[in-house]
Every structure is written in C-alpha cells, then in structure tokens.
Amino acid sequence: MGIATLITFIVYLIGMLLIGFAAYRLTSNLSDYVLGGRRLGPGVAALSAGASDMSGWLILGLPGAIYASGLGAAWIGVGLSIGAYLNWQFVARPLRVYTEVAKDSITVPDFLENRFHDNSHILRVISAFVILVFFTFYTSSGMVAGAKLFEAAFELSYTQALWIGAIVTISYTFLGGFLAVSWTDFVQGILMFLALIAVPVVAVSELGGWSAAIDAVGQIDPAHLNMVQGVGAMAIISSLAWGLGYFGQPHILVRFMALRSAKDVPRARLIGTGWMVIGMYGAILTGLFGLAFVATQDVSGLENFGVEVMSEGGVQMLADAEKIFITFSQLLFHPVIAGILLAAILSAIMSTIDSQLLVSSSALAEDFYKAIFRKNASERELVWIGRLAVAVIALIAVLIAGNPDSSVLALVSYAWAGFGAAFGPTILLALFWKNFTRNGALAGIIVGAVTVMVWGGFLTGGIFNLYEMIPGFFLNLIVAIVVSMMGTPSKEVIEEFEAAKQR
C-alpha cells in the first residue's frame, strides 16, 4: 500500500473513533446505549439500516458471487430489494408505534415480552438466546471480511489482519453504543454508495465502454450474462427467499424502533430503498466486469496486495473471488482514492459488525442480566455490562472466523436464515394478529431456529437443496398460528393491541 493510500485509510479510522468518543459523551443510560433515545432522523435511520444490513456482503460477498457464477447469483439481490421495501412499507411504522405503547420496549426480546405481558420472562430469554447464537456467526462473517481487507491492504497474515480489524470495530461500539453505530453507519452508507457507483463506471471505461465490457464477459463465458441459464428453479426460489429474512433481523428492526417519529417512515423508506437498489446494481456490475478485467488486463501487481491470481482453463482468474472489489480499488485509482475505496470496504464491514455487537450486548444486558440476575441494576451498571458483552461476543466471533478459507457469503447466509426463520413470522403476527399468544410466539421461535440449525447442518443437498430460511420461516408461521388457536390472549393484551393499531 502506498503512503497516500495508507494516510487516507488511517484518517478514516480516526474519524470513526472520534464519532465514538462524541457519542460516548451523549450516552448516559441503557436506552441511549441500545436505542439512541429514539431520536434518529429519517436519513440517518435509512442509511444506518441499509449499511448495517448490507455489510461486507455487498462489497465483497455479492461481487464475488457474480464474479464466480455470473448473473445467476443476482437473484439474491432481487429477493433482498423486494424484502427491504416490504419491510419498510409494512413493518417499520407499526413496530415504531407498538414498541412505544408496549412499555417503551428498547429491544426485540423486550418488545415480545411486553407485547404478550409475559411475566415468566421465558419468551425474552429464549429470544435473547437465539439472538446471541446467530449474531455470533453473523459477526464472524464481518470479521472474515475485515481480515481479507487488512490482509490485502497491509500485507499481513490472515490472523494478524483478523485481530486488527476486530479491535478497530470493537473500540467505537464499546464507547458510543447506538448513537456511535448510527452516526458512523450514516457516514459509511454514503461512502459505500459512492464507491459502488465509482468502481463499475471506471471499470467500464477501462474496458472500452459498455458494449466492449459486455462482449468481453460474453467471450469468456456467455453463461455469465444469463440470469437463468444453469440456475435451477430451486436455486432461484432459495435466492428470492432471502427477502423473507428482513422481517426478523434484529439489527434492522431496532432502526425502526429508534426513529424519532412514525411520520418519518415514508421518507426513510424512499432513501433506504433507493440506496439499496443502486448499491446492489453497482455490486453486481463490479463482479460482472471484474471477470473481464482480470482476464484481459495486466494484473501482475496484485500479489503486492495479498491478492492471488491463477489460470483456470487458460483464463486469468482471482483465487479468491471475494477480493474483486479490492482488486479494482488498487489497480484503477489514484492512491488517495484507493484509500477511500478501502475505507468504503471497511465501512461496509464495520457498519454491520457494530450493529450486531450492539444488539447482542443489549440482549445480554437487558434480556439476561437485568431480567434474571439483577432486576434493580442501575442504568450505569447495565451500560457497562453491555460494553463488556461487546468485547466477549466479539472475541468468540474472532475465534469462529479463524479459518482463512471462511466464506463471507456462507456465514451471512446461515445467520440471515436463523433470524428470518426465528423472528420474521413472530414479528409479523405480533404486529397484525390480535389473537397471537405468548405460547404461539415461543413455539414458533423455537421451531424456526431449530429448523434452520437442522436443515442447514444435515439436510442440504439433493432433494433438500433448499435455503433453510424457507422451511424455517413457514414451519414457524404454521406452528405459531396452530398453537395460538389453542389459547386466548388476555383482555389487557388485546386492549393494548387495539390501542397500538389506532395510533
């Protein structure tokens, strides 16, 4: 890495830490730490939700999948775009209103307990446990992405890169909590957006224009330009099903809860959906034209950035497809711009890890520690328990991410399915069905989570080659409805439901 690139990169990191320190001074209680006092504007909420959602997957995972498999891998993007829009359209406003009505709930487990007036705390504890399990895997995916970046940028070993990336992200999350996470995500979201526009535009220019770039891809592998060739119906269904996951992602749902007003939802929806669709196109084009660029251009200097090039069927290819964005940033741009683009990759990674760590820490502090062990714990004590949880969860995630061959996309896929199947139907039914019961919610969450674990671990391949999100989501939905029909919610629960619907 050149000196100019390094300096630009370091300036970015210092800026993120300064935001963490500023947020630290505004964080005095647990509500501030995990929900920012419900004072996010629509722009910050939208870009924060998008950045925390898309992560290193958008800049590393998706371009890598397109580079390796062609446009057939873009179905995931279609499913996610539809799911994100529907989530903003149908879930954001009701959840913002209902969480305030239900005793000003500040976490997803907190909302579920208050929604059903569950004095046993079992629903809160099981929900928090599911969050901790799947977020540990999700966070590890970000650690892998961060390690790949630092490995390439600083010529470090994978292990050294893994620890450096983890320490940077943990630092400002530990200090500033939700405000630090949201403000940094806003900056990071803008940076990611600009990077995903700039990279494919410059790549197309280098390849001689749009037609020349498309022709170059077609000459290498015509199937790369076809969304359906070689892609079975099951694969398309599985990819589209990623959109179902949005309804159950705690780190996205908490952005809805943190909006300063339900009236801000339409503007936030427009900003968030527009950001996502354009960013997704940029990521897809980066992977697609990356195939042509690496195959036809001189990429001999890439080994200096930790990017290995090999020959496959006489075609020059990257050994690790998920490093295509890093390849472009190093070969096509001035060192200062390259530093900004590397910062954009780190932005994508950090913006998701910090959100996941924060939701996990709030689950431990609010939903385990306070609910079970220290009901009278002070706000200051809970904030510090949350900070300690950030460090512990991150350490476990680093250990899971210790394998240099780990795939960002594979780890994200498993965790995304876990949350979508466990919480997606539960949140939808909790918001829209007044006869939904505590036992129905509990049974659905358990069935959804266990289905993902079993299906993903033992039943993939062959006739079961279906994304585990699908069976998990629909089994949760069926079980939750059936069990709820065996009981009746209390009068108080129904009255509160009606009160939330009328606001």
Image (spheres, rainbow, N blue to C red):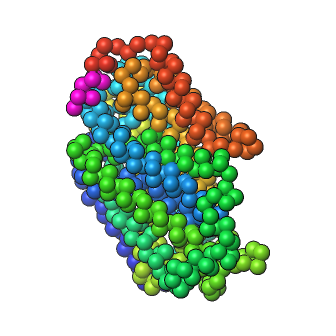
**Is 350 placed above or below 487 here?**
below
Residue 348 vertical position relative to residue 198 in the rendered view, above or below? above
Residue 369 shows in this picture: no
Query: Is 99 placed above or below 299 here?
Result: above
Viewer-nearest residue: 441 or 499: 499
Residue 16 lies, in percent from the top left, at 35, 64
Name the residue at 76% across, 79% down: 314
Rendered image quadrant of residue 453: top right
Report the residue at 68% width, 76% height from top.
Answer: 220
Instruction: Determine whether, in the image, residue 405 is placed left or right of residue 152.
Output: right
Residue occupying the point 65% across, 48% down: 233
Q: Main secondary structure of the magenta part?
A: helix
Q: How many marks?
A: 0
In what quadrant of the picture does the C terminus appear? top left
Displayed quadrant of residue 262: top left
| Extent of the magenta region | 496-503
Residue 55 in sight in this render: yes
Q: Classify 185 as above or below 388.
A: below
Residue 409: percent from the left, percent from the top?
59, 55
